[in-house]
Image (cartoon, rainbow, N blue to C red):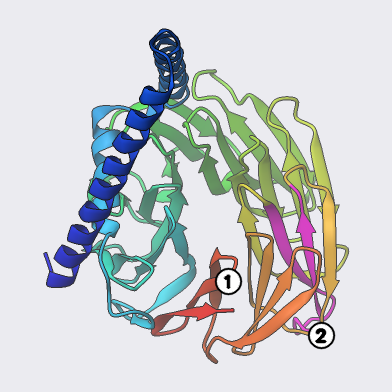
């Protein structure tokens, strides 16, 4: 451990010990002022309250409280401590795809052509592990990262502190996803079918659920946080025309719990929102689907081109649409978690990346980041580098930016 890390931990432990002493002193003073009779009644009440809260917490988080999950959580917290050289931080490897730049449990994670890297807020290297994949693709679900080799067989599940699991599938992978509790799924090419969905328990290579697609070519899949709802989108043909399908599975029933058709659209992205709804994106449509009753809220692009998008599971969806073929004069559209349009912001910008969080909207255009409030009020324009190609808000006053060779931090 570096000297800076040691100093940081010493300061942290000192502060914790001070807080504990203050807490004990406060409790002792309260006990002196309360009559003995009421003190005992208060103690019983507090004991029952703490026990009740503990039972409810354990029940709600029972899928995430296995010994290995708890150990991973503790290790992740420990490795995040420490001070790094600060941003910008040079990328390990030669190139990074835009889709391989995400937040992992609050820290920036990036997968290059050679390695998985995670950095804390001061650019301290929390993780740096080689993956060996030809076409790596990153998926993140809270504190778990899944990296798979698109059209290859390799797959790895990572946390900030450790490589949890690595394996090779017998068939080529078309898509994959992971839940917070380690349950993961893949869609692979398989003989006689257009694809096969398989679900696996954490660190297992034997599937507990399978479903074969007979005519739908899967383009993306997603799993909710507890691994109990799984969605896929794909493309097929019907009566000579293109049609996309959304399948929603529960991981138990023989067939899909729900199947919806999207005529004349090519769906390429699916993800979950915190209210349980599913977001699907295509070349000409955004749809938010209620997984319980199958009702969907569609928004058609109407001859506008999608230039960028961001799905925030807790906040909603942000789109950038352009009327022109060259991507200029983009309009920013903000949707809530039910698919209702909340705000549209007209611009003269050629937007190539967006991020939405903390009631802030950011848009990258020609090396600058434009920042807006949720209500559309412009907050400013900030230099993000001429090669900026992706952005992630990490607070109301800052964002990480991906360039060709480095990761930057901008503050506003």
Lateral position of residue 243 relative to residue 165, left or right: right
State the mark number for residue 397: 1
> Furthest residue to the right?
302
Q: Position of residue 234 (x, y in %)?
A: 62, 46
Q: 10 Å neighbourhood of mark 2: few (<14), some, or many (≥20)?
A: few
Q: Which residue is mark 2?
A: 348
Within the magenta stretch, is there residue 322? yes
Q: Position of residue 27 (x, y in %)?
A: 36, 30
Q: Position of residue 160 (x, y in %)?
A: 30, 54
For the point 58% across and 71% down, which residue is it? 397
Task: Please state, as top left, top right, bottom left or bottom right, where the C terminus lies in the image.
Answer: bottom right
Q: 10 Å neighbourhood of mark 1: few (<14), some, or many (≥20)?
A: few
Residues drawn in magenta: 316-336
For the point 83% across and 55% down, which residue is it? 342
**Circle 2 SS class:** loop
State the mark number for residue 54: none
For the point 23% across and 38% down, which residue is it? 71
Q: Position of residue 29 (x, y in %)?
A: 36, 31
Give the answer, above or below, for where 405 lies relative to 203: below
Give the answer, above or below, for where 51 lies relative to 223: above
Lateral position of residue 134 relative to residue 301, left or right: left
- Marks 1/2: CA distance? 24 Å
Taking depth in this image into account, of 42 and 227 the one nearest to the observer is 42
């Amino acid at each position: 451990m570096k000297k800076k890390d040691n100093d940081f931990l010493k300061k942290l432990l000192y502060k914790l010990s001070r807080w504990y002493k203050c807490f004990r002193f406060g409790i002792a003073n309260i006990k002196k002022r309360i009559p003995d009779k009421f003190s005992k009644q208060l103690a019983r009440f507090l004991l029952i309250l703490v026990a009740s809260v503990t039972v409810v917490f354990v029940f709600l988080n029972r899928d995430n409280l296995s010994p290995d999950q708890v150990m991973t959580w503790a290790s992740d917290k420990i490795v995040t401590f420490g001070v790094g050289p600060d941003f910008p931080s040079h990328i390990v490897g030669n190139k990074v795809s835009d889709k391989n730049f995400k937040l992992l449990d609050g820290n920036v994670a990036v997968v290059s052509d050679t390695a998985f890297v995670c950095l804390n807020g001061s650019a301290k290297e929390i993780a740096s592990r080689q993956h060996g994949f030809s076409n790596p693709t990153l998926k993140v679900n809270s504190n778990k990262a899944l990296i798979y080799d698109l059209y290859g067989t390799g797959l790895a599940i990572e946390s900030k502190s450790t490589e949890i699991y690595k394996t090779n599938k017998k068939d080529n992978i078309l898509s994959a996803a992971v839940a917070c509790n380690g349950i993961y799924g893949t869609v692979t090419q398989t003989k006689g079918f257009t694809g096969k969905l398989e679900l696996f328990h954490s660190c297992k290579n034997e599937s507990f659920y399978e479903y074969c697609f007979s005519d739908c070519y899967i383009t993306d899949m997603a799993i909710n946080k507890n691994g109990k709802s799984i969605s896929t989108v794909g493309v097929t043909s019907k009566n000579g025309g293109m049609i996309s399908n959304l399948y929603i599975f529960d991981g138990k029933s023989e067939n899909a719990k729900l199947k919806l058709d999207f005529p004349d659209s090519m769906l390429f992205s699916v993800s979950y929102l915190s209210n349980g709804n599913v977001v699907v994106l295509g070349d000409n449509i955004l749809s938010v689907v209620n997984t319980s009753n199958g009702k969907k809220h569609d928004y058609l692009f109407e001859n506008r081109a999608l230039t960028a998008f961001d799905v925030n599971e807790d906040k909603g969806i942000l789109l950038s649409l352009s009327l022109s073929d060259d991507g200029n004069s983009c309009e920013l559209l903000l949707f809530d978690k039910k698919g209702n349009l909340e705000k549209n912001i007209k611009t003269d910008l050629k937007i190539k990346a967006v991020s939405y969080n903390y009631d802030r909207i950011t848009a990258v255009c020609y090396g600058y980041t434009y920042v807006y409030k949720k209500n559309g009020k412009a907050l400013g324009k900030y230099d993000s580098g001429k090669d900026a190609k992706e952005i992630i808000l990490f607070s109301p006053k800052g964002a990480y930016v991906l360039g060709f060779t480095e990761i930057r931090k901008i503050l506003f």
